[in-house]
Amino acid sequence: MRLSIVTALLVGSSLAAPHHEKGLSLNTLAQRRGKLWFGTAADIPHTAETTDTAYLDILKKQFGEMTPANALKFLFTEPEQNKFNFSDGDYFMDLARHTGKSVRCHNLVWATQVSDFVTTGNWTAETLIPVMRNHIFKTVKHFGDRCYSWDVVNEAFNSDGSFSSSIWYDTIGEEYVYLAFKFAQQALKEVHANKVKLYYNDYGIESPGPKVDAVLKLVKELRKRHIRIDGVGLEAHFMVGGTPSLADQVATQKAFIKADLDVAMTELDIRFAQEPFYTAEAQRQQAQDYYVSVSSCLLSGRRCVGVVVWDFYDKYSWVPYSFEGQGGATLFNDTLEAKPAYYAVADALMGKPCSVC
Ligand code: 9MR
């Protein structure tokens, strides 16, 4: 009963400035706790998000960081060999600058969303390495210190900790990861942007296991070679009811921090495996899972630098496109109303017990 009253109150509240303590934004609450920002991915430009004023209003008010969900990926930045197109990225960067946001630049080297000229080419390591080098150099130098960080290599491991198949790994071997970080570091130096952080980013590394061990090994290997890596991005794409425990999330973040790394939660969302997404009980469980996840970054200390959600509006979430029947994963429902999950995140950021869980 109490829950349904709370839910009714929440649904009736103002959207852009939901009513928790003084209506402070999630970003302000996070910064008050020593985080750099509370951020969101946004798929801008060329999408409905680009011109959705109600959506953009919340984006501007609530978040201190934005990650381009697609605009900086290989496919879009270098559609044909050595023909670069940074217009989407520049559009995104301008929006971030005008609204005072940091940008986690995402990503340079990944198996997915690579241009056809790469995936269909007949490469050897000797011919593909210069392609990767050129892509990294041109892209990193173009965006320079407009990026807070770069996800240099994205999702390079299988869940058992072995390297996953990609045009890069299959052609160059694990050396591709070391080279990618080396090239990114060199490119930043050329444009005097050494402060831009270099990250490895992946999912399934939010609780202990072989994949976490593989990332820690990779970090050691990079450092043995005197190649810089500053942080690890924990994507945190979770399922409602299946979110890793607070203890597991904190233990994993602390293991990375102990290895002298920053950590960030880079793509947090918590989806339902099936409908219904919006019953009071479903919302309560989701709120609890968000509360635990955001709390983990606070409990891990300053070197968990911030949390980024992978968009904040169910209508624009990637989930239903990738997993049929699944969804409801973000902080705002399909009519752009703040969910209990939103208030749970605010509670976590304020260090309060969860009022909606
Ligand atoms: O949100 C992105 C979606 O629009 C793309 O279609 C998809 C292609 O694989 O990539 C999504 O973003 C992914 C991110 O780049 C890396 N981690 C997983 C994200 C969700 O799939």
Image (cartoon, helix red, strand yellow):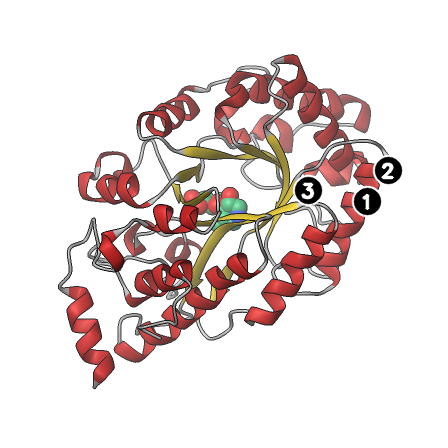
Residue that badge 2 annotates? 224
Residue that badge 3 annotates? 166
Q: Earlier in the sequence, mark 2 or mark 3?
A: 3
Between the C-alphas of marks 2 and 1, the distance is 6 Å
Q: Position of residue 263 (x, y in %)?
A: 60, 48
Instruction: Residue type at mark 2: give it.
Output: Lys
Residue that badge 1 annotates? 220
The secondary element bearing badge 3 is classed as loop
For the C terminus, the quadrant is bottom left
Query: Which residue occupies 45% across, 52% down?
Result: 33
* Left or right, 131 with reference to 277: right
Query: Which residue occupies 26% across, 58% down?
Result: 21
Q: Nearer the viewer, residue 121 or 274?
A: 274
Q: Nearer the viewer, residue 322 or 265?
A: 265
The secondary element bearing badge 1 is classed as helix
Query: Which residue occupies 71% across, 57% down?
Result: 255
Q: Is mark 3 within 8 Å of ligand 1?
A: no
Q: Quadrant of residue 345?
A: bottom left
Q: Nearer the viewer, residue 20 or 5?
A: 20
Residue located farthest toward the bottom when viewing the structure as drawn:
1
Q: Position of residue 54 (x, y in %)?
A: 18, 43
Q: Is residue 64 visible?
A: yes
